[in-house]
Image: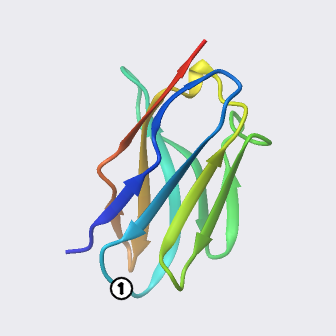
């Protein structure tokens, strides 16, 4: 069973930065999508940024502030988050999709104080 190991969450003041990292526990073949999602209290999980077949996608709310970087060979995907806002507060989840199977990380809390 593939597991994803996340790190990098924490508490930061508005305007600050955090970097999230995610790595697979074992070599996974056929990966076509890597990305980050988030879920705030009382809200549905939403995509933040993802790579799919080499194309990067960002939600409108994070464009220009967040940068996703992925390495398929190392099977890592990072999310650099700059100029964080209180509305970015959420649990962030890493996703890797392989052969139509989604693997999720355990989630890492990001809290942005005003």
**50 to 40, vertically: above or below:** below
Quadrant of the image for the N terminus? bottom left
Residue at 46%, 39% (x, y): give it. 38
Q: Quadrant of residue 22?
A: bottom left
What x and y, as percent, mark residue 88? 57, 28
Name the outermost residue toward the right.
Answer: 64
What x and y, as percent, mark residue 87? 58, 21
**39 to 33, vertically: above or below:** above
**3 to 59, vertically: above or below:** below
What x and y, as percent, mark residue 45? 42, 38
Q: Secondary structure at mark 1?
A: loop
Q: Quadrant of residue 105?
A: bottom left
For disc 1, the neighbor class at 10 Å (few under 14, some 14 to 19, many from 20) is few
Q: Which residue is mark 1?
A: 27
Residue at 65%, 21% (x, y): give it. 14
**45 to 74, vertically: above or below:** above
Quadrant of the image for the C terminus? top right
């Amino acid at each position: 069973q593939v597991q994803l190991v996340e790190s990098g969450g924490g508490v930061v003041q508005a305007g600050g930065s955090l970097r999230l990292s995610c790595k697979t526990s074992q070599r996974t073949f056929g990966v076509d999508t890597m990305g980050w999602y988030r879920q705030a209290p009382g809200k549905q999980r939403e995509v933040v940024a993802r790579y799919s077949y080499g194309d990067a996608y960002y939600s409108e709310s994070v464009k220009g502030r967040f940068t996703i970087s992925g390495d398929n060979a190392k099977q890592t995907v990072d999310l650099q988050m700059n100029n964080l806002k209180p509305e970015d507060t959420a649990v962030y989840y890493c996703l890797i999709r392989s052969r139509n199977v989604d693997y999720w990380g355990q989630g890492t809390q990001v809290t942005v104080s005003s």
